[in-house]
Protein backbone atom coordinates (compact mmCIF):
# COMPACT_ATOMS: atom_id res chain seq x y z
CA UNK A 1 0.00 0.00 0.00
CA UNK A 2 1.30 3.43 -0.85
CA UNK A 3 0.03 6.98 -0.97
CA UNK A 4 2.93 8.01 -3.18
CA UNK A 5 1.72 9.61 -6.43
CA UNK A 6 1.48 8.06 -9.89
CA UNK A 7 3.74 9.95 -12.32
CA UNK A 8 2.33 10.56 -15.79
CA UNK A 9 3.97 12.39 -18.67
CA UNK A 10 3.27 13.35 -22.24
CA UNK A 11 4.78 15.61 -24.88
CA UNK A 12 1.99 18.08 -24.21
CA UNK A 13 -1.69 18.32 -23.46
CA UNK A 14 -2.85 15.09 -25.15
CA UNK A 15 -1.87 12.89 -22.21
CA UNK A 16 -4.49 14.66 -20.13
CA UNK A 17 -6.93 12.26 -21.81
CA UNK A 18 -4.99 9.39 -20.17
CA UNK A 19 -4.68 11.29 -16.89
CA UNK A 20 -8.44 11.77 -16.85
CA UNK A 21 -9.13 8.06 -17.44
CA UNK A 22 -6.77 7.09 -14.60
CA UNK A 23 -8.39 9.64 -12.31
CA UNK A 24 -11.89 8.43 -13.26
CA UNK A 25 -11.01 4.81 -12.48
CA UNK A 26 -8.95 5.52 -9.35
CA UNK A 27 -10.11 8.89 -7.99
CA UNK A 28 -8.41 8.17 -4.67
CA UNK A 29 -4.90 8.05 -6.17
CA UNK A 30 -2.54 11.04 -6.12
CA UNK A 31 -1.21 12.04 -9.54
CA UNK A 32 1.64 14.19 -10.82
CA UNK A 33 1.25 14.98 -14.54
CA UNK A 34 3.93 16.66 -16.65
CA UNK A 35 3.20 17.93 -20.18
CA UNK A 36 6.32 18.95 -22.09
CA UNK A 37 4.51 21.75 -23.94
CA UNK A 38 7.68 23.83 -24.49
CA UNK A 39 9.31 21.01 -26.50
CA UNK A 40 6.12 19.73 -28.15
CA UNK A 41 5.67 18.00 -30.60
CA UNK A 42 7.73 14.84 -30.14
CA UNK A 43 6.23 13.13 -33.19
CA UNK A 44 8.63 14.72 -35.66
CA UNK A 45 11.78 14.37 -33.53
CA UNK A 46 14.55 11.75 -33.63
CA UNK A 47 14.47 8.71 -31.38
CA UNK A 48 17.60 9.90 -29.49
CA UNK A 49 16.01 13.24 -28.66
CA UNK A 50 12.75 11.63 -27.50
CA UNK A 51 14.73 9.25 -25.24
CA UNK A 52 16.68 12.18 -23.77
CA UNK A 53 13.51 14.18 -23.04
CA UNK A 54 11.82 11.12 -21.54
CA UNK A 55 14.77 10.44 -19.23
CA UNK A 56 14.86 14.03 -18.05
CA UNK A 57 11.17 13.97 -17.19
CA UNK A 58 11.45 10.55 -15.52
CA UNK A 59 14.33 11.84 -13.36
CA UNK A 60 12.10 14.66 -12.20
CA UNK A 61 9.17 12.33 -11.42
CA UNK A 62 11.47 9.96 -9.52
CA UNK A 63 12.73 12.94 -7.50
CA UNK A 64 9.06 13.47 -6.53
CA UNK A 65 8.94 9.90 -5.19
CA UNK A 66 6.33 8.52 -7.63
CA UNK A 67 5.39 4.85 -7.20
CA UNK A 68 4.98 4.15 -10.91
CA UNK A 69 5.37 5.94 -14.23
CA UNK A 70 2.89 6.07 -17.08
CA UNK A 71 4.30 7.24 -20.40
CA UNK A 72 1.03 8.74 -21.66
CA UNK A 73 2.45 9.50 -25.08
CA UNK A 74 2.51 7.08 -28.00
CA UNK A 75 5.59 8.70 -29.50
CA UNK A 76 7.61 8.57 -26.24
CA UNK A 77 6.33 5.03 -25.51
CA UNK A 78 7.50 3.89 -28.96
CA UNK A 79 10.95 5.44 -28.61
CA UNK A 80 11.78 5.32 -24.92
CA UNK A 81 9.74 2.70 -23.02
CA UNK A 82 12.52 0.06 -23.02
CA UNK A 83 15.15 2.55 -21.88
CA UNK A 84 12.99 3.87 -19.06
CA UNK A 85 11.91 0.38 -17.94
CA UNK A 86 15.54 -0.83 -17.92
CA UNK A 87 16.98 2.13 -16.06
CA UNK A 88 14.53 2.81 -13.24
CA UNK A 89 13.50 0.63 -10.40
CA UNK A 90 9.73 1.23 -10.36
CA UNK A 91 6.96 -0.06 -12.65
CA UNK A 92 6.80 1.82 -15.95
CA UNK A 93 4.03 1.35 -18.47
CA UNK A 94 3.54 2.82 -21.91
CA UNK A 95 0.45 3.23 -24.05
CA UNK A 96 1.25 0.93 -26.97
CA UNK A 97 0.72 -2.49 -25.39
CA UNK A 98 -2.68 -1.71 -23.79
CA UNK A 99 -3.90 -0.23 -27.11
CA UNK A 100 -2.69 -3.22 -29.11
CA UNK A 101 -4.28 -5.67 -26.65
CA UNK A 102 -7.63 -3.86 -26.75
CA UNK A 103 -7.66 -3.78 -30.57
CA UNK A 104 -6.95 -7.52 -30.78
CA UNK A 105 -9.66 -8.29 -28.24
CA UNK A 106 -12.22 -6.19 -30.09
CA UNK A 107 -11.09 -7.19 -33.59
CA UNK A 108 -13.77 -7.06 -36.26
CA UNK A 109 -12.86 -8.79 -39.51
CA UNK A 110 -9.25 -9.58 -40.35
CA UNK A 111 -7.46 -6.24 -40.13
CA UNK A 112 -6.48 -3.49 -37.72
CA UNK A 113 -5.75 0.11 -38.69
CA UNK A 114 -3.38 2.37 -36.77
CA UNK A 115 -3.22 6.14 -37.08
CA UNK A 116 -0.38 7.85 -35.21
CA UNK A 117 2.44 10.38 -35.49
CA UNK A 118 5.31 9.86 -37.93
CA UNK A 119 7.70 8.74 -35.15
CA UNK A 120 5.22 6.14 -33.84
CA UNK A 121 4.45 4.77 -37.31
CA UNK A 122 8.14 4.62 -38.25
CA UNK A 123 9.02 2.81 -35.02
CA UNK A 124 6.66 -0.04 -35.93
CA UNK A 125 5.82 -0.38 -32.23
CA UNK A 126 2.12 -1.10 -32.76
CA UNK A 127 2.91 -3.72 -35.39
CA UNK A 128 5.30 -5.43 -32.97
CA UNK A 129 2.79 -5.49 -30.10
CA UNK A 130 -0.16 -6.59 -32.26
CA UNK A 131 1.91 -9.38 -33.85
CA UNK A 132 2.79 -10.77 -30.39
CA UNK A 133 -0.93 -11.30 -29.78
CA UNK A 134 -2.21 -12.05 -33.26
CA UNK A 135 0.49 -12.95 -35.80
CA UNK A 136 -1.90 -13.28 -38.74
CA UNK A 137 -3.99 -10.12 -38.57
CA UNK A 138 -3.45 -7.59 -41.37
CA UNK A 139 -2.20 -4.22 -40.11
CA UNK A 140 -2.49 -0.92 -41.96
CA UNK A 141 -0.64 2.09 -40.57
CA UNK A 142 -1.05 5.73 -41.51
CA UNK A 143 0.73 8.76 -40.13
CA UNK A 144 -1.87 11.36 -39.28
CA UNK A 145 0.38 14.18 -38.14
CA UNK A 146 -2.06 16.97 -39.02
CA UNK A 147 -4.59 15.69 -36.50
CA UNK A 148 -2.27 16.93 -33.74
CA UNK A 149 -2.45 20.69 -34.53
CA UNK A 150 -6.13 20.29 -35.49
CA UNK A 151 -6.87 18.98 -31.99
CA UNK A 152 -4.54 21.55 -30.39
CA UNK A 153 -6.30 24.41 -32.14
CA UNK A 154 -9.71 23.17 -31.06
CA UNK A 155 -10.73 22.52 -34.70
CA UNK A 156 -12.13 19.10 -33.90
CA UNK A 157 -15.55 19.76 -35.40
CA UNK A 158 -14.47 21.51 -38.60
CA UNK A 159 -14.22 20.87 -42.33
CA UNK A 160 -10.44 20.72 -41.96
CA UNK A 161 -10.83 17.87 -39.46
CA UNK A 162 -13.29 16.02 -41.70
CA UNK A 163 -11.05 16.49 -44.73
CA UNK A 164 -8.00 15.21 -42.83
CA UNK A 165 -10.03 12.24 -41.53
CA UNK A 166 -10.93 11.19 -45.08
CA UNK A 167 -7.36 11.72 -46.25
CA UNK A 168 -5.93 9.55 -43.49
CA UNK A 169 -8.59 6.86 -43.05
CA UNK A 170 -10.43 6.31 -46.35
CA UNK A 171 -7.78 4.09 -47.91
CA UNK A 172 -7.59 1.62 -45.01
CA UNK A 173 -11.37 1.74 -44.63
CA UNK A 174 -11.71 0.71 -48.31
CA UNK A 175 -9.34 -2.18 -47.58
CA UNK A 176 -11.75 -3.47 -44.92
CA UNK A 177 -10.43 -2.01 -41.67
CA UNK A 178 -13.19 -1.97 -39.03
CA UNK A 179 -11.00 -1.62 -35.93
CA UNK A 180 -8.89 1.52 -35.75
CA UNK A 181 -6.36 2.32 -33.03
CA UNK A 182 -6.19 6.03 -32.19
CA UNK A 183 -2.42 5.81 -31.69
CA UNK A 184 -1.79 9.32 -30.47
CA UNK A 185 -3.01 10.93 -27.28
CA UNK A 186 -4.61 13.83 -29.16
CA UNK A 187 -6.76 11.66 -31.37
CA UNK A 188 -9.49 10.73 -28.85
CA UNK A 189 -10.47 14.40 -29.09
CA UNK A 190 -11.40 13.73 -32.75
CA UNK A 191 -13.38 10.59 -31.99
CA UNK A 192 -16.80 12.12 -32.58
CA UNK A 193 -15.82 13.65 -35.93
CA UNK A 194 -14.27 10.40 -37.18
CA UNK A 195 -17.29 8.38 -36.01
CA UNK A 196 -19.68 10.65 -37.86
CA UNK A 197 -17.92 9.87 -41.16
CA UNK A 198 -17.12 6.21 -40.47
CA UNK A 199 -20.04 5.04 -38.38
CA UNK A 200 -19.16 1.35 -38.38
CA UNK A 201 -15.53 1.86 -37.45
CA UNK A 202 -14.64 0.75 -33.90
CA UNK A 203 -12.24 3.39 -32.53
CA UNK A 204 -9.82 2.11 -29.90
CA UNK A 205 -9.21 4.93 -27.43
CA UNK A 206 -6.24 3.77 -25.40
CA UNK A 207 -6.88 6.01 -22.34
CA UNK A 208 -9.23 3.66 -20.53
CA UNK A 209 -7.17 0.58 -21.44
CA UNK A 210 -4.11 2.16 -19.82
CA UNK A 211 -6.11 3.04 -16.72
CA UNK A 212 -7.04 -0.66 -16.30
CA UNK A 213 -3.40 -1.63 -16.80
CA UNK A 214 -2.29 0.87 -14.15
CA UNK A 215 -4.89 -0.48 -11.72
CA UNK A 216 -3.75 -4.06 -12.36
CA UNK A 217 -0.09 -3.17 -11.84
CA UNK A 218 -0.76 -1.30 -8.59
CA UNK A 219 -2.77 -4.26 -7.26
CA UNK A 220 -0.11 -6.80 -8.22
CA UNK A 221 2.66 -4.78 -6.56
CA UNK A 222 0.52 -3.89 -3.56
CA UNK A 223 0.98 -0.21 -4.32
CA UNK A 224 -2.65 0.87 -4.30
CA UNK A 225 -3.70 3.59 -1.96
CA UNK A 226 -5.91 2.20 0.77
CA UNK A 227 -8.42 3.98 2.95
CA UNK A 228 -11.92 5.32 2.65
CA UNK A 229 -13.55 4.99 -0.75
CA UNK A 230 -14.58 8.65 -0.80
CA UNK A 231 -10.99 9.85 -0.58
CA UNK A 232 -10.20 12.33 -3.37
CA UNK A 233 -6.62 12.17 -4.61
CA UNK A 234 -4.44 15.18 -5.18
CA UNK A 235 -3.73 16.08 -8.83
CA UNK A 236 -0.67 18.18 -9.59
CA UNK A 237 -0.37 19.37 -13.18
CA UNK A 238 2.91 20.69 -14.56
CA UNK A 239 3.89 22.01 -17.96
CA UNK A 240 7.14 23.31 -19.40
CA UNK A 241 5.10 26.12 -20.97
CA UNK A 242 1.61 26.99 -19.79
CA UNK A 243 -0.18 27.38 -23.11
CA UNK A 244 -3.76 28.42 -23.79
CA UNK A 245 -4.52 24.89 -25.02
CA UNK A 246 -3.26 23.37 -21.79
CA UNK A 247 -5.50 25.69 -19.76
CA UNK A 248 -8.50 24.92 -22.00
CA UNK A 249 -8.09 21.16 -21.76
CA UNK A 250 -7.38 21.30 -18.06
CA UNK A 251 -10.69 23.11 -17.60
CA UNK A 252 -12.52 20.50 -19.70
CA UNK A 253 -11.03 17.54 -17.83
CA UNK A 254 -10.31 18.77 -14.32
CA UNK A 255 -12.67 21.54 -13.40
CA UNK A 256 -11.97 21.04 -9.70
CA UNK A 257 -10.93 24.36 -8.22
CA UNK A 258 -7.88 22.85 -6.56
CA UNK A 259 -6.36 21.70 -9.85
CA UNK A 260 -4.01 24.37 -11.05
CA UNK A 261 -1.06 24.20 -13.46
CA UNK A 262 2.49 25.07 -12.46
CA UNK A 263 5.29 25.88 -14.86
CA UNK A 264 8.32 23.63 -14.64
CA UNK A 265 11.33 23.76 -16.94
CA UNK A 266 13.11 20.44 -17.40
CA UNK A 267 16.30 20.38 -19.44
CA UNK A 268 18.51 17.85 -17.83
N1 LIG B 1 1.63 12.70 -27.20
C1 LIG B 1 1.98 12.54 -28.58
C2 LIG B 1 1.60 11.12 -29.03
O1 LIG B 1 0.78 10.46 -28.40
C3 LIG B 1 1.29 13.66 -29.33
C4 LIG B 1 1.93 14.16 -30.54
C5 LIG B 1 3.36 14.66 -30.51
O2 LIG B 1 3.96 14.97 -29.48
O3 LIG B 1 3.90 14.74 -31.62
O4 LIG B 1 2.13 10.61 -29.97
Image (cartoon, rainbow, N blue to C red):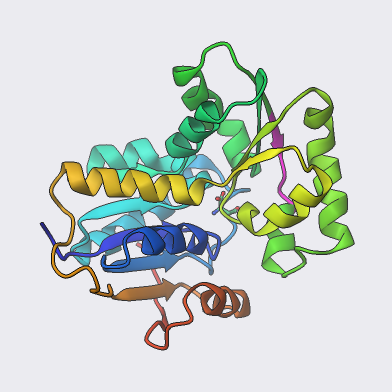
Residue in view at x 79 percent, y 64 percent: 157
- Quarter of the rendering containing residue 91: top left
> Which residue reaches farthest bottom?
257
Q: Residue 209, percent across and down?
A: 44, 44
| 87 sits to left or right of 266 | left
| 250 sits to left or right of 177 | left
Magenta run includes residue 253: no
State whether residue 199 is above or below residue 175: below
Residue 90 visible here? no
State whether residue 165 is above or below residue 259: above
Residue in view at x 77 percent, y 55 percent: 193
Residue in view at x 50 percent, y 28 percent: 105
| 144 sits to left or right of 53 | right
Comparing 184 with 100, the one in front is 100
> Which residue reaches farthest front?
229
Residue in view at x 25 percent, y 73 percent: 230
- Image quadrant containing the N terminus: bottom left
Q: Residue 92, percent across and down?
A: 29, 45
Residue 130 visible here? yes
> Which residue reaches farthest top?
136
First to last magenta residue range: 141-146
Q: Residue 68, percent across and down?
A: 25, 53
Q: Residue 132, percent across and down?
A: 44, 19
- Image quadrant containing the C terminus: bottom left
Amino acid sequence: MSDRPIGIFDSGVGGLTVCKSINDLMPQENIIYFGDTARFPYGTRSKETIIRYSREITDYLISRNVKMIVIACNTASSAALDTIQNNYNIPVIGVIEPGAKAACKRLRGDSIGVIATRATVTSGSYIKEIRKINPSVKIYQQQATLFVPIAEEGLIDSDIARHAAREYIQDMYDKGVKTLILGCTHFPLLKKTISEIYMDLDLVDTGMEIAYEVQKTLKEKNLEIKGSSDRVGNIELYASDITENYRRLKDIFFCRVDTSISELIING
